[in-house]
Image (spheres, rainbow, N blue to C red):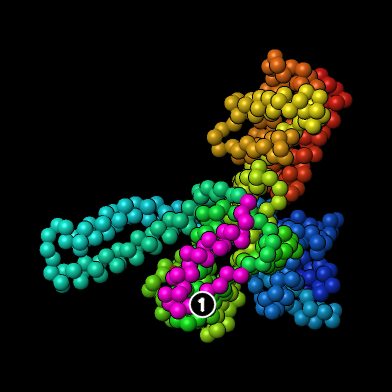
Amino acid sequence: MSDFEGIIKAVHCMPQGMLLVGGDQEILFVNDAASKILNTGPSSPLLFRQLVETVGFDPFQLLNESGNTPFTREASIASTPYKATVFPVPGINGHNGVCLLLRNIAQEKRIDTMKSEFISVVSHEMRTPLTSIKNAIEIIMTRKTGTITDDQQKFLQIAERNISRVVNIISGYLDLAKIELGKVEFHFQEISLQTFMEGIARDFLARAQEKGITFSCTLPEGLPSVTADPQRLEQIVVNLLDNALKFTPDKGSITISSQPGEAPPGSGDRRFVKVSVEDTGRGIPASDRERIFDKFYQVEDSPARKMGTGLGLSIVRELIEAHGGKIQVESEPGKGSRFSFYLRIAAGEKRDLQFRYFFDREFVRASKNQSSFSLILIAIKNFKELRDSFGDQKGMLLLEALQKVLHDSLFRQADTLIHYKRGEIFVVICEVEKHGAEVVKQRIKKQIGEFSGDSLSEVLKKSIIGVGIATYPEEAPNQRELFRKAIKDAEEDIHGKEKDPDRGR
Ligand code: ADP
C-alpha cells in the first residue's frame, strides 16, 4: 500500500466526518463518517446545494465574510448536533476549495444540559437566602435597628456590594439557564422598530449625557415592522447600550442605526432588519471577539471587569436566537465596536407568528434532546366555499366546534394547538414519535367522524376535512419538509375520502 493510499484509508477511518469541496462547488471527497452523517453514497451522490441545506450555511460565503479565516459552527443534522469546522484549502484544480469537518457533539450537549440544570437548581436555592442577607444588611445600614459606628458602616457596605454582585450573577445565570432550557415564554408581536427604538433612546439619552457621551438613534424612514417579543427586545437593546456606555470613555459617541433587507451572516434570506449599536469605546481584541458571547467570559484587562458578570452577551445572544435572528460584532481595538443583530421582518398575521414560534421551539428542543415530535394538520379543504354558502357565522361555529373536539378529547397539556391561516388549518404539535402520531391521527379522524351538532349537521355533511401527520426526524430532516409532508398526507387523506366518501365518516 502506498503512503497516499494509507492516508486515504486513515481519513476514511476517522470518527469525524470530512468533506472536500472544490472552488467550483463540486464535492470532491466525502469520507466514510461524512457519508453516514449526510446519508449519501455512490448511489446518491451529494450535491453542494444539498450540503448547504443540510448544514444550514454556505461554507464559501462564511469564509468570505470571515476574511478566509477558519471558523466553527454548530449544525443540526437529522436531529443530531455537530460541530462543523471549515477551513480554506488553496489551489485545488487551480481554485480555492474548502474542507469541512463534522464532529458529533450530542454527548457534550447532554452533559451541558445536565450541568445547566444542576447549576440552576443550586443557584435557585441560593438566591432566596442571599436576598434575605442583602435585605438584612440594608436595614442595619439605614440605622433603623440602632446606631452603628462608621467602621461598621464601612464593612457593611463592603458586604452589601459583594452580596449584590453574587445576587446579580445568580439572577443572570438563572435567566440564561431558563432561556437555554426553553422555559421562557415569548410573546411575539408585530413591532414598529421606529417607535420602539425611539422610546428606548429617550430613556438612554440622559444617561449618555451624564457621561458627556454623544448619543444618536438614526433609523431610516419606512422601516418595516419586525416580529419580536417587546419585553425581550428591550432587554437586548438595553444590554447592548449598557455595555457601550460602560466601555466608552467620556466624550465618546454611541449610535443606534438600522438597515432593512439585510441577510444575517451565512444566510441568503434578506427578510431581516439589521439593528446596530455602535460605540467609540475601547474595542475588543480579535482573539476575544467570538468568546465574549460565552458564559462568564470577560476580556482580561477590562477595567469594567469587576462591574459586570460576563453573562449579558450570552443572554443577548440566546434571546436573539430565540427570535430566529443572529448577532455579530465588528471591532477595532482602541477605536470602537459595532454590535449588530438581525430580526425577522413581520409578514402576515399573528397566528402564523405564534405557530412559527412554537414550531421553532419544538424543533430546537427535539434537536437538542435527540427526541421526536410530530406535526398533525387538520385541514378543511373547502372552508371558503362552506362560508360562502352557509355564512360567516356557521363557518365560525364549525371552527369552534372542531377546535373544542380537538381540545377536549385528545391532547395533553404539553401539546400545542394552533389556528393557522385564518382557521382553514389547525396544527397540533405533539411530543410523540411516528407510531404515537398515527394513533393520534386515527383518534382525531374517529372524533371528527362522530362529530355532531344539530345546527351544524348541514355544514358538516358538506365539509371536506383531511388529517395529515409528519414526524421529525424520521420523516423529514427540517421544518419545511416536515410541514410539506404533513400537508401532503392531509391531501392524500382528503383525496381518499373524495374517492370513497364513507371512509372515515
Ligand atoms: P459584562 O459586561 O457583564 O462583563 P457581557 O457578557 O455583557 O458581560 O460582556 C462580556 C465582555 O465583552 C465584557 O466584559 C467586555 O470585556 C466585552 N464587551 C462587551 N461589550 C463591549 C463594548 N461595547 N466595548 C468593548 N468591550 C465590550
Number of callouts in the render? Answer: 1
- Please tell me which residue lies in front, 235 or 412: 235
Task: Say whether residue 160 is left or right of residue 218.
Answer: left
- To which residue does mark 1 refer? 214
Left or right, 336 with reference to 53: left
Q: Secondary structure at mark 1?
A: strand
Which image quadrant: the N terminus? bottom right
User: Between residues 242 and 67, which one lies in front from this camera angle?
Assistant: 242
Residue at the image position 80 percent from the left and 82 percent from the top: 91
Judge from the rendering whether residue 264 lies leftward or rightward of residue 146; answer left or right. right
Depth order, front residue of 247/494: 247
User: Splitting the image into 4 quarters, where does residue 90 fall?
Assistant: bottom right
Quadrant for residue 268, please give it.
bottom right
Q: Residue at 56% of width from left, 48% of height from top?
A: 187
* Magenta stretch holds residue 386: no
State the image coordinates of residue 274 (x, y, percent, origin top left): 65, 65
What's under tag 1, amino acid-wise?
Answer: Thr
In x, y percent, where is residue 16? 66, 65
Asked if residue 481 shows in the view, the reply is yes
Q: Residue at x 77, y 28 (%)?
A: 387
Name of the residue lying farthest toward the top: 454
Which x, y percent locates residue 289? 56, 75
Q: Dot 1, how many residues are within 10 Å of its Cα: few (below 14), some (14-19), or many (20+)?
A: some
Q: Is residue 305 above or below residue 494?
A: below
Magenta stretch contains residue 195: yes
In x, y percent, where is residue 375?
68, 40
The residue positioned 72% from the left and 33% from the top of the image is 378
Q: Residue furthest right?
A: 499
Q: Is residue 336 left or right of residue 133?
A: right
Q: Quadrant of the C terminus?
A: top right
Boundaries of the magenta span: 190-218
